Image (cartoon, rainbow, N blue to C red):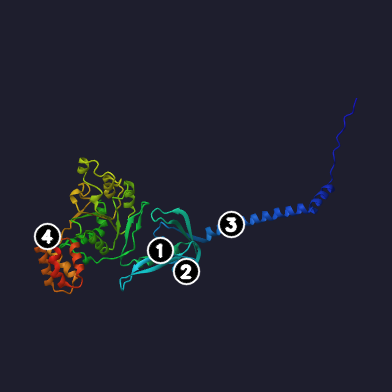
């Protein structure tokens, strides 16, 4: 019978284990690898600790303000920051614009500087502020410019410093626009944008309408602006609509410009014939209209005709804007229509307008602005030639009235421009000039 071999178990003593680890220590490759792992682990812990400490520092001991370029205060803040950076900023961006010189009324070129994309530091009221301007790849549909973000960070726990900065930036920007009327237009992105540069405010007396019209309109709007409480207490929607109608060239648009300057409002022009204007977009534009502005709908008859016309000729308005009359009516006084709004419509053909568009509640005041009357002609003459005896203006008006024709304010003003500094020449040549019409 064969004997099975019995396995021999090796007994490793403690002294052998110690010698094994000692040999690993003496191995240069093992020692180097273990050291690198230790250093890497240490650096990783240090990095995490630094990041954690920085995040904790930001949350506990700093405050930040983020402004996107779509916000109205973005440009104000950039210009204000540049005034505080002064000569310390090494990287700046420039915007070139043109403005009239107050002395000679000639157009001059000006430059507006702002911090460029990147990080900048400046001091405000003993506080160091970090300003980071970031430019995104996304494009703003209203301006066509890249979307930007401005982030301001400073030590502290309160945001009062940022509120103070924004108020100063706003005040500085408004001081530059003092005495100006801003014109807004509807952009492609469904929001409002500035159209051109701010315009000098037009004097109210520079637009001569028939007796009492201008003053009555101005007083009505001023009464509306101070009657919000009266409207709310009686449950009446706080908005006002006006319709100016009459022949072309009689001063409708000019009067609106002068009226806006008098009540210190801007003008937001809305083109209803825009092919990209839909009912939904119109509602958004009405809701986002600039504060303290008049919404101007010029030549409203060109966008819509009476429903009787469309009924008799269904193809009469094909190819026009996708905006519907129902959409405009809802924007004017629907459930979602905005409050505190002034809308002025103009038309040369009031008979073409749908009765539903100009009913009370949508149009509160209808004002006819027609051809020049005797009183208008005399006052226009006196405006152009203020140092002339009033008897000449009376004689000039008599000559035009004797022609037994209708003349617009634009026609009379065009004639005065030919004799800017010579009232006697204007009186002598008016017959031959106006007989052409």
Q: CA distance from mark 1 to mark 4?
A: 53 Å
Left or right: 422 in relation to 57: left
Quadrant in which the C terminus appears: bottom left
Q: Give x and y (percent) for residue 100.
A: 33, 69
Q: Secondary structure at mark 2?
A: helix
- Checking the image for residue 85, the label placed there is 2
Q: CA distance from mark 2 to mark 3?
A: 30 Å
Q: Secondary structure at mark 4?
A: loop
Question: Does 381 appear above or below 298?
Answer: below
Q: Give x and y (percent) for residue 191.
A: 36, 53
What residue is pinned by disc 3? Answer: 51
| Of residues 356 and 202, the one drawn nearer to the viewer in this rendering | 202
- Checking the image for residue 76, the label placed there is 1
The residue mark sitting in front, 1 or 3, is 1
Q: CA distance from mark 2 to mark 1?
A: 15 Å
Q: Earlier along the polypeptide chain: callout 1 or callout 4?
A: 1
């Amino acid at each position: 019978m064969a004997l099975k071999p019995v396995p021999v178990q090796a007994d490793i003593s403690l002294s052998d284990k110690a010698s094994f680890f000692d040999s690993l220590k003496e191995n240069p490759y093992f020692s180097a690898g273990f050291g690198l792992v230790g250093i890497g682990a240490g650096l990783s812990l240090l990095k995490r600790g630094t990041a954690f400490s920085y995040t904790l520092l930001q949350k506990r001991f700093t405050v930040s303000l983020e402004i996107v370029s779509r916000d109205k205060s973005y440009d104000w803040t950039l210009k204000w920051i540049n005034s505080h950076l002064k000569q310390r900023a090494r990287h700046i961006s420039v915007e070139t614009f043109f403005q009239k010189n107050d002395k000679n009324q000639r157009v001059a070129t000006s430059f507006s500087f702002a911090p460029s994309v990147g990080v900048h530091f400046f001091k405000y009221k003993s506080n160091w502020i970090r300003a980071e301007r970031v430019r995104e790849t996304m494009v703003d549909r209203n301006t066509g410019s890249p979307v930007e973000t401005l982030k301001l960070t400073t030590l502290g726990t309160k945001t009062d410093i940022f509120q103070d900065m924004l108020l100063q930036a706003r005040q500085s920007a408004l001081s530059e626009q003092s005495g100006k009327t801003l014109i807004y237009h509807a952009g492609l992105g469904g929001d409002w944008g500035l159209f051109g540069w701010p315009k000098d405010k037009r004097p109210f007396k520079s637009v001569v309408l028939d007796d009492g019209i201008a003053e009555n309109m101005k007083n009505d709007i001023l009464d509306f602006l101070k009657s919000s409480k009266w409207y709310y207490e009686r449950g009446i929607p706080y908005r006002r609509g006006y319709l100016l109608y009459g022949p072309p060239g009689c001063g409708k648009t000019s009067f609106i410009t002068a009226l806006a300057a008098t009540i210190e409002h801007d003008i937001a022009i809305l083109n209803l014939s825009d092919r990209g204007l839909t009912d939904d977009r119109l509602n958004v534009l009405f809701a986002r209209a600039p504060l303290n502005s008049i919404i101007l709908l010029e030549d409203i008859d060109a966008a819509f005709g009476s429903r009787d016309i469309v009924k008799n000729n269904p193809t009469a308005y094909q190819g026009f804007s996708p905006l519907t009359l129902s959409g405009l009516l809802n924007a004017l006084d629907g459930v979602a229509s905005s409050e505190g709004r002034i809308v002025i419509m103009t038309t040369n053909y009031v008979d073409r307008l749908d009765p539903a568009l100009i009913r009370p509640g949508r149009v509160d005041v209808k004002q006819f602005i027609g051809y020049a009357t005797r009183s208008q002609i005399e006052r226009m003459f006196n405006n152009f030639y203020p140092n002339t005896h009033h008897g000449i203006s009376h004689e000039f008006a008599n000559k035009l009235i004797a022609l037994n024709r209708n003349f617009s304010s634009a026609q009379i003003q065009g004639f005065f421009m030919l004799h800017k500094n010579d009232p006697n020449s204007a009186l002598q040549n008016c017959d031959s000039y106006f007989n052409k019409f």
